[in-house]
Image (cartoon, grey):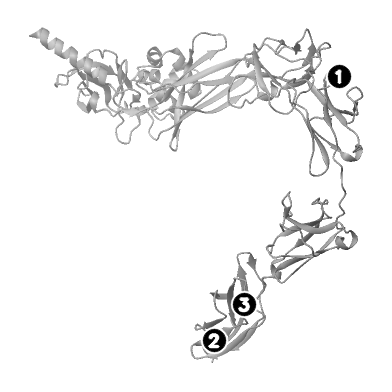
Amino acid sequence: MKTIITMCLSIICFWVKAQEPTNTGVEMGQLMPGKNAVCGIVPSEEGRSSFDSYKGIVKQFDVYKDENGRGNFKKINTLTFPSSFDDFTKRAGTVIADAVKNALEVTDGSTAYKQLQSGNIKSLGMFLISKEFLKGMGMMWEDENIKNNNPSTAYRVVKVNSDGKEQILFTQKINEVKRIPFGAYRLKDLVNADSVIQLTWTAKLTNAPAVFGKIYRLKNGEKSYQLINPPSLFYSVNDTSKTFYAEEVKPGQLYRYYVVPEDFAGNQGLPSDTAYAISKSFSQIKGIANFSIKDSLKGAWLSWKALPNEGIYTGVQILKSRKSTDGFIEVATLSATDSSYFDKAILPNVTYHYQVRPLTIQVKGYTLLPAATANIAVKSQQDTPMAPQGLKVWQDSTAQVKLFWDVNPEIDQFAYYVLRGTSKDDMRIVSGALRTNTYTDSLQNLNEQSTYFYGIQLMNISQKMSEVSSPVMFKPLKVEFVPYPSGLGLRYADEAVKIFWENMIEKNDDIVGYRVFRKLRTEKEFKSLNEAPLRTTVFNDTTAAPGYDYDYAVSAVNASANQSILSPVSTITIPLTAVLAAPADLYLINKPEGVYVSWPAHNNLKLTNSIYRKSNLDKEFKLIANVETSDFYIDASAQKGALYSYRIVAKTKLGVSEPGIEKSIRRN
């Protein structure tokens, strides 16, 4: 039976351990269950601080424990005030004892002990979070024998006076202690200097259990993180829990840090994010120096001054482009100790632009360092470009000779050249250096009785010229000149643009008519306004809309249906006011139902007449009605005896006219 009970208790204990909340802690107080021990601070009585808990008749504090929670309490500890400063030193340790004397600004133990006995020691406030100090003062107890503890385990603290009288200060079970989640601490601020690193971690939490911050550091070259002593302290500001750490370090080295929050009982939260810090200001980091490129064995040899041997550098990035301003791609990332690179992946006679940039670790305050730049074209004296292919030659409608050919596949192109001659063996260059694969030749350079041959050559960056492309034969068509009007006039009237020009029919019997062309000022191409040639020299364009700028031109057509080039272009702006105006007059009549407002009927343009009114008390006119299909309006809101002024504004989708004539009337 005893074995069965033991097994059940073991199972219960195992279940309790498995269900113990993670990432939670407890507030600093009278009972603090921890991972490796349960501890507590002697509670303060009303009106008395923890420093003077032993003043008066208090002799000691006894700590009891009920392991199974069945009321069977056993004494596990007795707390007493130190009998002397030597006794305090024995309990708290020499380091804390010396720190207390320094804080009290005394040199001997007896004076320090007297001040400890006084209880009113403001200068020792920070020692209240020192376990060694609290144990030395007999203010804190600790139970490390917690192997068989369970949630029902209870602790009791009893105050014993000098006359032997006892008083229970509290009794509390472990499961009655409130567990509080630790915050998720993240790096808030990081300051890198040449020999100092400062870090701040924060978490949004109003009631944080964290008291100590265990800082772990990994130096450049080390394999594992090391715990830094002493721990940092957490403090709260408004709704934020934060801790701060700073240390002097060796300049130019990489350091990694993270913090683990811990409460007074030793419960720990989750580690913070890792902070990467460099003990060097970004402004002091050196970039690439002495960067140069040389032509070497069908490749580009890049070299630069080696970077300093510091942990801030992680590599050297090589970028390349055939443009000087954009299009750079990464071709290699080298070790930070490398000082040269040989690029074989290049084409001869092509200019390449290179950028070399040192890479640093990604830490706060560090950005990309500027890159060193240079360019080179590795020349090849043997390779000549391939002769261009696909040459086409034709005469277009503007009496120009057009040439088009395929773009050569070579990348190392300098320019194309057009050749022309009356035989295949006697062609000469007639163009300048062309960067495109098109060319326009003028018929003025050609004899209509001759046959011509055209060809194309390509020159590369090494000034090597290709063979001439396969010649293409071309015979120019007879060009017949058709005279055109020397100009034209424009005016806008009666809702149309009236166009008139010089009468070419009277001057040339071969001219049979005209074509009128129009485009918006913002457009590139003209469009014909008439399908059949006009015999007159006047044309009314009723399709032009007010509010736009138009360009007009006219061409002449001869009996052979050949068309001249366009006349000089004329431009007209059609203002809205040309078609959009308020009524020319305004009539006001008093009628029983209100003021009768009327006006002359407008032309057939669809518009809205907006009626505005102003009394003798108003400073400005106010809109009272919009009339679309009528030529009158009755103002029934006019007050008797008041003097009113009226005016009308015409509106369309195109805009608004100027206000019309203004008239006044007194309502009777």
Q: Residue at x 86, y 58 (%)?
A: 485
Q: What amino acid type should be assigned to the residue bearing mark 3?
A: Ile
Q: Earlier in the sequence, mark 2 or mark 1?
A: 1
* Quadrant of the image occupied by residue 600: bottom right
Quarter of the C terminus within the rendering: bottom right
Crowd tier of the residue under label 2, counting other residues whose Cα lies within 10 Å: few below 14, some 14–19, many 20 or above: many
Q: Which mark is residue 648?
A: 3
Residue 225 x %, y %: 49, 12
Local secondary structure at mark 2: strand
Left or right, 308 with respect to 68, comes to right
- The residue singled out by tag 1 in the image is 463
Q: What amino acid type should be assigned to the residue bearing mark 2?
A: Val
Measured along the vertical axis of the image, is residue 242 above or below residue 110? Answer: below
- Tell me if I can see residue 159 in this picture: no
- Tell me if I can see residue 268 in this picture: yes
Comparing 258 with 246, the one in front is 258
Q: Earlier in the sequence, mark 2 or mark 3?
A: 2
Residue 371 x %, y %: 71, 22
Crowd tier of the residue under label 1, counting other residues whose Cα lies within 10 Å: few below 14, some 14–19, many 20 or above: some
Q: What amino acid type should be assigned to the residue bearing mark 1?
A: Gln
Local secondary structure at mark 1: loop
Local secondary structure at mark 3: strand
Quarter of the N terminus within the rendering: top left
Q: Residue at x 37, y 23 (%)?
A: 264
Measured along the vertical axis of the image, is residue 306 above or below residue 645? Answer: above
- The residue singled out by tag 2 in the image is 595
Left or right, 181 with respect to 417, comes to left
